[in-house]
Amino acid sequence: EAPDSRFEDFGTVKLGGGRATVTLDAVFREATASSRDYHVFLTPQDQTANVTVESRRAGSFTIFGDADATVAYNIVAIRRGDVGVRFTLKDLH
């Protein structure tokens, strides 16, 4: 569980020349308040690869790193309409 309602998306991309731009899925963008307020977590799939998020935009983000690295990513954003709502008490019975 999380303190607020979030959506996630996952994927893998191979860098070309040290960069790759990932376009956010249209359904993900529509379901979230993702303009730039989203988190990107990167996991290099090559043991020695160094990668980082170079930039985030409303509909995409760019990864910078070792020339031909393969990178798994996880994107997390707050659900549209739930911005600012945290730890809402719900009846679980």
Image (cartoon, grey):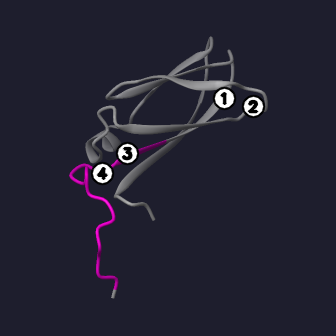
Choose the circle earlier in sequence order: 1 or 4.
1
Residues tagged 1 and 2 counted as in contact (Cβ below 8 A)? yes
In the image, is residue 69 above or below residue 43?
above
CA–CA distance between discs 4 and 2?
32 Å
Choose the circle earlier in sequence order: 1 or 2.
2
Q: Where is mark 3, residue-wise?
A: 77
Q: Is residue 79 magenta?
A: yes
Badge 2: residue crowd in 10 Å (few <14, some 14–19, many ≥20): few
Q: Where is mark 1, residue-wise?
A: 70
Q: Where is mark 2, residue-wise?
A: 46
Mark 4 secondary-structure assignment: loop
* Residue 45 image-quadrant placement: top right
In the rendered structure, which amino acid carries the disc numbered 4? Answer: Arg
Q: Nearer the viewer, mark 2 or mark 3?
A: 3
Residue nearest the observer in this picture, 72 or 78? 78
Picture coordinates of residue 68 (x, y %)? 69, 19
In the image, is residue 18 above or below residue 22?
above
CA–CA distance between discs 1 and 4?
29 Å
In the image, is residue 52 above or below residue 72?
above
Residues tagged 3 and 4 counted as in contact (Cβ below 8 A)? yes
Q: Is residue 37 magenta?
A: no
CA–CA distance between discs 1 and 3?
23 Å
Q: Left or right of 45: which side holds 56?
A: left
Picture coordinates of residue 50 (x, y %)? 69, 24
Span colored in magenta: 75-92
Mark 3 secondary-structure assignment: strand
Choose the circle earlier in sequence order: 4 or 2.
2
Q: In percent of the image, x 61 and y 21: which residue is there?
A: 15
